[in-house]
Amino acid sequence: MKKIRLVIFTRNKIGAAVVGVAAALIFLTACSPGCVLQGTGKSSSNSDIIIMSWNVENLFDGIDDGTEYREFDPGEGDWDTSRYHTRLSAVGRVITEFLDPMPDIICLQEVEHTGVVEDLLKWNLKQYGFSFSAVTDDFGSAIQTSIISRFPITRVKVHGASAAGIANYSLRSVLEVEILIGDESVIVLNNHWKSRIGGAEATEPVRIASAKIINRIISRNFMENPGRLVVCTGDLNESADEYERTGRSYQTALMPQTTPGAAAISSLRITGLSENASDDLGVLYNPWLADENDFVTEGSYVYRNKWATLDHTMVSEAAFDGVGLEFLSFTPFVHPWMLNTSGEPVSWDTRSGEGYSDHLPLLLTLTQNPNT
C-alpha cells in the first residue's frame, strides 16, 4: 500500500469565532420546479465550516425505476436492495468515520433520486445533525445532485434542463441553495457537467453551456447582494487547467482569468490567485491552480493512469474580503481504504460489494473572521 500523507493547503491561520444559529427561528424556504426540498430541525454550530463535494459514482437504490444503468438494474443483473444497503453504508462510513471532523455541508453527485438521499439521512447522517437537504429531479435522468446541510437551507433553485442548440446532448441541472450560517447567507452551487464521452472537444459546448449558467448566477448574486459568498462545487468533467491541457487549441468551459479576448466571455473564468477573484468580473478562485498547493494527490480522478482535477470547489471574491466567512483551506481527501495499491481511488465494484468511488472527495474549509 502506498504511504498516505494528508496535506492541506492553507491560505492563512485566522483565529475562528463560534458561528451560532438560533434554533428558535422559523425559516421560509422556496423551491423552484425540478427539485425536492426536505428538512426541518436544529443545525449545528462550529467555528470552522467544512464543505465536502463528492461524486459517489452511481449511488442507485435496489428498485427497478427504469432509468438506472444496466449493472444497477435489479431486473437485469445481480443488483438488489441488499447490495444497495452495503453501498449506502460504504458512502456513510466515509462521511461519518473516515472524516474527522465531519463536514457541515455535503454536495453529492450521481445519486439516483431523493429517496437515496432520504435513506442516507435516515441510516447514516440524521443522528449527526444533518437535517436539511435538496435534490434535483431531472426528468428521465438516472443521476441527480444533492446538497445536505447541518445549517438551514432557506432557498432552492434549479437551473437548466436542456442545452438549446446543442444537438444530441442534454444539460444537467445546476442546483443552487442558499444556506444560513449564523447570520450570514451563503450561496452553494452543486454541478455535474456533461461527461467527455463522445470526445472532449465535441462535448465541450455542453460544458460551456453549464458554465454560462454559473456566470449568470454569479452576476445575479453580485447585483442582488454584493459581498455574499458563492461556493461552486461539483464534478465538472474538466480539469482546472483544461485549456492548457488542450494546447490552447479550443475554448474550454473553464478558462484562465488572464485569457484575453472573447473566448473567455462565455466560459467560467478561474484563477489560482486569491487577489484576482472578482465578483464584479465573475472570476472564481480555484485552489487547484494555487502555486502554494502541496496535495497528497495530483487530482481527484484517474484516467488512463493520469490524475485529473475534474472535481472542484471554488469560491467568490467574498471569501477573501476580510468579512464573515473566509477561505481557510482546500484538499482532496484520501484514506488508505479508499485507494488501491497504486494509490488511485478504489471504484465501487457491484460484484464484490467493495470499494467507494472512482472520485476522491474534496474538502473546503471556511473560517469566521474574528474581526467581524
Image: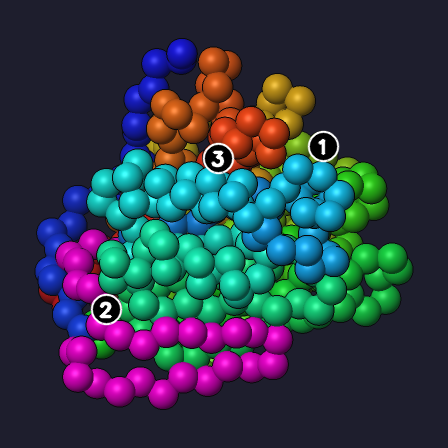
The numbered mark at residue 43 is 2
Residue at image point 50% right, 29% down: 354
Q: Residues within 10 Å of mark 1 (few under 14, many from 20)?
A: few
The numbered mark at residue 247 is 1
Q: Quadrant of the C terminus?
A: bottom left
* SS under mark 2: loop
Q: How crowded is mark 3: few (under 14 residues within 10 Å), some or many (20 or more)?
A: many
Query: Which residues make up the magenta segment?
Result: 22-49
Q: Is any part of residue 21 visible from this angle?
A: yes
Q: In which quarter of the image is the N terminus?
A: top left
Left or right of 64? Residue 283 is left
Rendered position, 50 above or below 5: below
Left or right of 100? Residue 170 is right
What's the residue type where badge 1 is placed?
Answer: Gly
CA distance for labels 2 and 1:
47 Å
Give the label, 2 or 1, closer to the camera.
Answer: 2
What's the residue type where badge 3 is placed?
Answer: Tyr
The numbered mark at residue 141 is none
Rendered position, 154 above or below 145: below
CA distance for labels 3 and 2:
28 Å
Q: Residues within 10 Å of mark 2 (few under 14, many from 20)?
A: many
Rendered position, 143 above or below 94: below
* SS under mark 1: loop
Report the residue marked by disc 3. 356
Q: Residue 233's x, y, as percent?
A: 48, 54
* SS under mark 3: loop
